Image (cartoon, grey):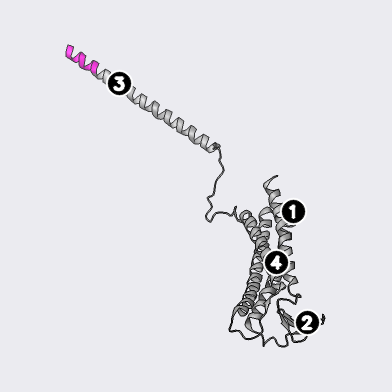
Amino acid sequence: MGYRTVVMYIEIGCFVVCVAGWILVCSTQPIEIWTWSEVNSIVLTTSNYFSNLWKDCISDSTGVSDCKGIPSMLALNWDIHMCRALIITSIILAFFGSILVLVGMKCTKIGGSEITNAKVTFAGGMNYLIGGMCAMVAFSYYGHKINSEFQNPNYVEQKFEIGVGVFIGWGGSTLLVAGGLIYSILAGREAFKSRPEKYPVTEYPAYTFVPSRKSYASSARTEITGTRKSRSSSGSRNSSVSVISSTTRKTGSNAYV
């Protein structure tokens, strides 16, 4: 099994994990039990109070329940607004992350080259990762707030406990963070490993010198000139030798006389 096949199967597994996490985070919005509290009355009835980011509910032991939406958004605390914004941002980012990953995965073959697909997959993985972190911050803060109020002995109002919606949100955000992290590592290594250098060195192809007619003519003229020079120098040497020999003969004849 080659490296590309292994990466393809890992991408498919991460896609399933991330989509499951996105569905879990989305399912926490209609769940009404983010916080719950049970109050026993004097008669044989029990009242259960539970709420989420959008409404407050109450039910009794007979099974009758009634929910009421939060009447004013401006009257809410800043932390409720923060949790709402973070969770909605997480859902939107994970949605676009799913689209990008579907385009860039190796098994779909929708994108262009391998590097382009890796960059698209890296962008989708970052969307998953950031969305999972946003959801994790929202659910963790909400759970910490409930726990600190429950453990505080000076808190005189009704105390609540952590409901099932927060636990589902923790699980979904964990899946988003894990899948997005794996996507980012795999696609990032493939997308940026062949990045060009900042100052590339230009390599010229090897070539063979082929002399032209002008070079042949210039070399021929050079050879002819050299031959003439050698001939003239040899002629001058011969003439000088003949002059010396004639001078020597005259000098010898004069001495004899």
Q: Which residue is mark 4?
A: 172
Our reading of the magenta stretch's main secondary structure is helix
The reply to whether the C-beta atoms of the residues labelled 4 and 1 are less than 8 Å apart is no
Instruction: For marks 4 and 3, give the CA distance.
Output: 113 Å
Q: Which mark is residue 59?
A: 2
Q: Earlier in the sequence, mark 3 or mark 2?
A: 2
Kindly identify the residue that appears in the image at 26 percent across and 20 percent down: 244
Helix, strand or loop at mark 2: strand
Q: Can residue 119 be seen by looking at this rendering? A: no
Name the residue type under label 1. Answer: Cys
Kindly identify the residue that appears in the image at 63 percent across and 79 percent down: 150
Instruction: For marks 4 and 1, give the CA distance.
Output: 25 Å
| Closer to viewer: mark 4 or mark 3 | 4
Name the residue type under label 4. Answer: Gly
Instruction: For marks 3 and 1, give the CA distance.
Output: 96 Å
Instruction: Tell me if residue 239 comes above or below residue 104 in the rendering.
Output: above
Residue 52, given in percent of the width and then of the height, sits at 71, 78
Instruction: For marks 2 and 1, give the CA distance.
Output: 50 Å
Instruction: For marks 3 and 2, give the CA distance.
Output: 140 Å
For label 4, count other residues whose C-alpha is less than 10 Å away and answer few (under 14), some (14-19) or many (20+). Answer: many
Q: Which residue is mark 1?
A: 107
For the record, the magenta segment spans 248-257
Q: Which mark is residue 241?
A: 3
The reply to whether the C-beta atoms of the residues labelled 4 and 3 are less than 8 Å apart is no
Helix, strand or loop at mark 1: loop
Residue 58, given in percent of the width and then of the height, sits at 76, 83
Residue 135 colored in magenta in the image: no
